[in-house]
Image: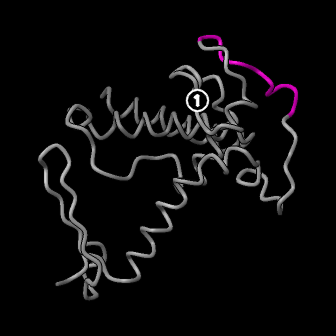
Amino acid sequence: MVCDECNIKEATFHSLKIINGIKSEKHLCPSCQSKQASRVSAAKNLAQIFSSFNAISGAGGANVSIPKRELKSCKNCGIGITEVLKEGFLGCPDCYETFLEVLLPMIAKVQNGTAHKGKSPYAAKKKSSAELEIEHLKQEIKLAALEERYEDAAALQAKIKSLLEGGSK
């Protein structure tokens, strides 16, 4: 049987999951299995990633202190960024927006970027490709601004403007 991931090598690892009566099988070769295992262990270590700023700074083992401007707490649930980083959990959905500046680089590192690369939900398919591109560019502008790459943000804004002008003709 061929590996479900690479479709090249012989599958030697087989798994069967039945969740709510839905059966799913996965057949993987040794290299794809090890990649998947490392992704799972990375997800389990999310609290460790939050607890150290090595994911952002690349510092070798030394914890980086949080600048005072980032010592804020969520207006909805009251959780502070230090508690989020220590526990590895957010208090409510508003925490994502409140702590975006700190969380976004960590999420980007853990997930190899911030753009969705998989299948789209049914509702998203109703949007045109130009609308989806504009939404993606707006997210990239936010990220560029957070990283203080203002020239890149301006170039992305120009792309959005050209897409909007092209769509209105």
Q: Residue at x 79, y 28 (%)?
A: 70
* Residue for badge 1: 90
The amino acid marked with disc number 1 is: Leu
Position in image of residue 63 (x %, y %) = 85, 50
The N terminus lies in which quarter of the figure? bottom left
Residue 144 figure quarter: top right
**Residue interval drawn in magenta:** 67-76
Q: Is residue 56 left or right of residue 16?
A: right
Which of the two residues, 2 or 17, is positioned nearer the viewer here?
17
Q: Residue at x 60, y 14 (%)?
A: 77
Number of labels in the image equals 1
Q: Element under label 1?
A: loop
Q: Is residue 51 left or right of residue 140?
A: right
Q: Residue at x 70, y 38 (%)?
A: 85
Residue 27 figure quarter: bottom left
Assign the magenta stretch its main secondary structure: loop
Which of the two residues, 153 or 96, is positioned nearer the viewer here?
96
Q: Is residue 167 left or right of residue 51?
A: left
Position in image of residue 131 (x %, y %) = 34, 33
Q: Considering only vertical position in the picture, is 52 above or below 76?
A: below
Q: Considering only vertical position in the picture, is 92 above or below 52?
A: above
